[in-house]
Amino acid sequence: MAENHPEKKKKVLVVGAGLAGLCGAMRLAANGYRVTLLEKNPQAGGRLNQIKKDGFTFDTGPSFFSMSYEFEAFARECNINLPFEFVPLDPLYSVNFKGSDKTYHLYKDPEKLAAQLADEEPGFAQKMERYLEECGKAFDDTVDIVIKRNFQSLFHYAQSLMEVNPRHLPKLYRSFWKQVCRYFDSDEARRIVSLVAFFLGRTPFDTSAIYTLLSYTEFRYDGYYNVKGGMYRIVEGLVDELSRAGVEIVYNTEIKSFESSGKQLQALVDSQGRRWEADHFLVNADAAVFRGMVMQRKKYSQRKLSKKSWTMGYLTIYLGLKTKLPQVNHHNYYLGTNFEAYAGNIMRQPDALEKPYYYVNVLSKHNPDCAPAGCESLFFVCPVPNLKYKADWSDRDTIVQSILEDFSERIGQDIAPEIITQTVYTPEDWRDQFNLHYGGGLGLSHSMLQIGALRPRNVDEEFCNLFYAGASTVPGAGLPMSVISSKLAFERIVEADSTRDKG
Ligand SMILES: Cc1cc2nc3c(=O)[nH]c(=O)nc-3n(C[C@H](O)[C@H](O)[C@H](O)COP(=O)(O)OP(=O)(O)OC[C@H]3O[C@@H](n4cnc5c(N)ncnc54)[C@H](O)[C@@H]3O)c2cc1C
């Protein structure tokens, strides 16, 4: 539980109850700030959300996470017990290629994976060892210098980059795919190892090789974790802790405009015209979209936002089945045969959706409370072009149908007659629910010109009491990054206070 501070400090208004907003609010409350949290939607979590329908429970977005130690550090820093329990995944996930009966289980032990790839990729274990060694160097040489640091200026960023071992320089210009091809010869090994690039909301072909550090985090350093009871337990636990720390969360409240005086933001104004005053403001809404839509910054006008590079969209399907699927694992990737062509086009070519690639999560596999007895709770994620490249989703049902037919064929069981409940989100739904530009599922992409100090900053350009945390500011997308982002923003607020106190 957070410490009781005899003298409460300044008042902070947090806008957005996504993971970065919840963690930011917790850090502030634990350090004596008086915190109010506003959220546009009727429940907390943002993209880390939950649907409860017809007796089924579905996680709506994230289904596992890496860098679990960031959550533990967060709890320590807030002086609370981590309010949820996580369990390591091993195998991390399973991969099936179209036309093959074989399913690859991605164990962290390279020997176990090598045994499955013995025919396709002789010497896999040694190759993987060499590959992961290089990925590990990229991780060790960048994580503290580039990812977990606030930059004071572009110059400071450039200086920090100079601290990175120059051996990684070529990786900035090489694609993830090309890097993987340097170590592995078979299509199967290359595709399996480069799948993680999709977790950044891009493809291995347009993601820089520096992100092969993710292979190190997934296979070697920490792996992936599930949360007991489902991912939404993270949110429920944090909301409980916030309530204990005296933080009020106000739902159904969307910020639309602001009032200011000189270099100070005085109040944010919601869609009902209510004014919300505070000493500091921490915005967890998308840092680029908020600057454009609410703060009316020219640099983030609709036209400028549209010129930025956004991550791909997601078509997500939540199915309740009145049967069990013992042949399906907890985390599964179903890939086609045209990986290069598909991945190369997925950002731009709606036609490529004819034979979609997708991920299936069976939440009820290890969390029986998430489905009625004898039933299964399924969650499909299909990477699709965002709304820039596919604005019309009137063919949604046809695409969903083709995914479900493909899945039925691959698992050898027609699931259509077993469906009790079905919910579908297109990129339009993701955009409208969470104010995501073009419905890009992970926000701004991680291209070289949109990372580090080149990403929208976590401290505002005009108002000295306005800060940002979340996927489109530093360091980037993914749950552990949200936790780190909340820390970086918190440090900015504390720094602003101490500078002012000294002044
Ligand atoms: C389908 C999908 C699958 C994913 N899978 C994974 C995974 O397996 N592992 C992983 O680590 N990551 C995954 N991610 C990424 C992860 O979900 C995000 O990086 C993370 O949840 C972002 O958190 P956030 O706090 O930055 O933003 P958000 O979750 O978007 O929170 C921002 C909040 O601000 C609110 N808001 C916006 N505008 C306003 C306003 N004007 N006024 C008031 N409130 C406002 C929104 O409603 C929202 O609640 C996935 C994402 C998607 C979409």
Image: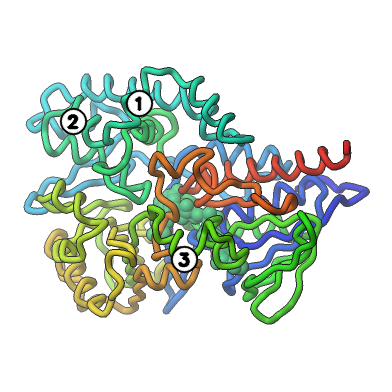
Tell which of 305 and 22 is nearer to you. Answer: 305
Nearer the camera: disc 1 or disc 3: 3
Q: Residue at x 50, y 45 (%)?
A: 455
Most extreme residue toward the right, as rendered? 6
Report whether 58 appears left or right of 234: left
The image shows residue 335, relative to residue 111, as above or below, that is below
In the rendered image, which quarter is residue 189 located in? top left
- Whether residue 44 is visible here, answered yes or no, is no
Q: Residue 181 bears which disc, if any?
A: 2
**Amino acid of disc 1:** Cys
**Amino acid of disc 3:** Gln
Q: Residue 302 bears which disc, if any?
A: 3
Report whether 30 appears left or right of 92: right
Where is residue 255? Give x, y as percent: 64, 70
Nearer the camera: disc 2 or disc 3: 3
The secondary element bearing badge 3 is classed as helix
Q: Is mark 1 within 8 Å of ligand 1?
A: no
The image shows residue 189, relative to residue 25, as above or below, that is above
Q: Residue at x 49, y 59 (%)?
A: 48
**Amino acid of disc 2:** Cys
Circle 2 packing at 10 Å, graded few (<14), some (14-19), many (20+), is some
Q: Residue at x 19, y 40 (%)?
A: 191
Where is residue 318? Give x, y as percent: 35, 69
Q: Residue 135 bears which disc, if any?
A: 1
Q: Earlier in the sequence, mark 1 or mark 2?
A: 1
Where is residue 382? Give x, y as percent: 28, 60
What's the image's color scheme?
rainbow
